[in-house]
Image: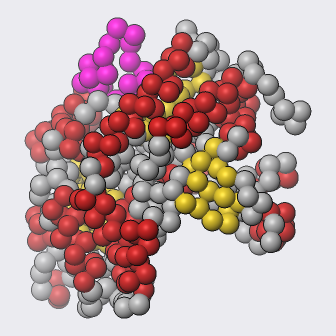
Amino acid sequence: MNNSTLIDRDLRTIWHPCTQMKDHEFMPLIPIRRAEGVWLEDFEGRRYLDAISSWWVNIFGHCNPRINARIKTQLDTLEHVILAGFSHEPAIELSERLIEITPAGLDRCFFADNGSSAVEVALKMSFHYWRNKGQKNKTRFVNLSNSYHGETLGALAAGDVPLYKETYAPLLMEMITVASPDCYHRRPDESCEEHSRKMFAHMREVLAQRHEEICAVIIEPLVQCAGNMRMYDPIYLKLLREACDEFNVHLIADEIAVGFGRTGSLFACEQADISPDFMCLSKALTGGYLPLSVTLTTDDVYQAFYDNYENLTAFLHSHSFTGNPLGCSAALATLDIFAEDDVIANNKKLAHKMQLATAALTDHPHVAEVRQTGMILAIEMVKNKNTREAYPWQERRGLKVYRHALENEVLLLPLGNVVYFIPPYVITPDEIELMAKVAVEGIEIATGKGRVTSDE
């Protein structure tokens, strides 16, 4: 078997996600044969350093022996069973352990299949809570500009990235959108904390004026990942939690992309010392192995649905593979690694290495900012450094970085003009050096300062 044979078979049958398929007329697909650690390998033996954790999911490396072993053991016992009216030990143990490690007060776990579904659960549960409480006027949700929460219709509505949302606008519920605390937009003489405090005034004004119609505020704590990896200060979360309490509004923390050590703490909310009313988890939950998500919430929310059947207050939301035992087992193995290894401390060393490896880019004439929160680092390319004028999106500068990286054994997947690193935690300092070197070269090419191949 070789790459070209599989590519031909693929293009006759598969419609790939988040892709303009016509691009594959000039940009070949890459079929992957095997993977280990941070490395992917195609059918012709070429390797690629997975600098994006295969869409931000893989944290402990591909084919991790500890996760493999737990899944293999479970596979011989129970592969799946309905979670309505039945249960199984992996789901019970995973719920117990998640409640133990997440912020205080999150005492109930509702399982689903993926991140978008976890967000749908949180939105529906918040709305239904207020309905069960007799406050049927609460029907609206607040989001942040430039936010992203998934692709199913409710989750898509909860976001604010036009690239994903505009086409489907007629199908979506209308959100109340508040300006993001995104620190990219702060004044040169302003700290990120000062900017985030200032921007919170917009949120407070909306909550003060419209809280009687608002169910919840939904946010991505600290990093708006799909929104070009834009970042803000933890003070915003602290102020938001206080305001949600004051105005009797739920707080939904979408930690799908930022949870499990990505931001420098196990969960991003910890950095503000807050507990949300709902926390959505997926991606790294299973170490990147299997689709699984969970929405954690409070006992107060749970009790609003706990009633006699004839009152019709139950939460009738389900997915066929809810709480799948194999996914739960992968998640338990992932939590074992956090419990047995000093992951967060080691990540801090790796994050520092990433910072050092990209430090020279801060003075690059076409880099507006190199920003970092824990194990997430982003480099924003611009046409004009002084004015921060962006390159036109039609020029696809990030695609040049992507193609150069593939030619040099690194998988980078820029968001428009933003090159980012979000690697597995098993990456070594030498692999970080390679990742950064290739990214710098790609940025040189994309901004017109380096070699450009003939087909570009």
State whether residue 60 is above or below residue 196. Answer: below
Residue at x-position 40% and y-position 10%: 188
State whether residue 416 is above or below residue 7. Answer: above
For this view, does 388 lie left or right of residue 301?
right
Q: Can residue 70 be seen in this view?
A: yes
Residue at x-position 19% and y-position 58%: 101
417 and 131: which is toward the camera: 417
Where does the magenta region start and end?
A: 180-199
Q: Does the magenta stretch include residue 187?
A: yes
- Of all residues shown, which one is farthest toward the front? 430
Q: Is residue 156 visible?
A: no
Q: Where is residue 361 in the image (x, y as percent from the top left)?
A: 54, 19
Which quadrant of the figure has residue 413? top right
Q: Is residue 177 magenta?
A: no
Q: Where is residue 423 in the image (x, y as percent from the top left)?
A: 48, 46
Identify the image quadrant of the N terminus.
Answer: bottom right
Which quadrant of the figure has residue 339? bottom left
Q: Where is residue 61 in the image (x, y as percent from the top left)?
A: 47, 57
265 and 172: which is toward the camera: 265
- Of all residues shown, which one is farthest toward the right? 454
Residue at x-position 39% and y-position 35%: 351
Residue at x-position 41% and y-position 49%: 425
Identify the image quadrant of the C terminus.
Answer: top right
Which quadrant of the figure has residue 241? top left
Q: Where is residue 412 in the image (x, y as percent from the top left)?
A: 61, 42
Total labels drawn: 0
State whether residue 124 is above or below residue 59. Answer: below
Q: How is this picture coloured?
A: secondary structure
387 and 357: which is toward the camera: 357
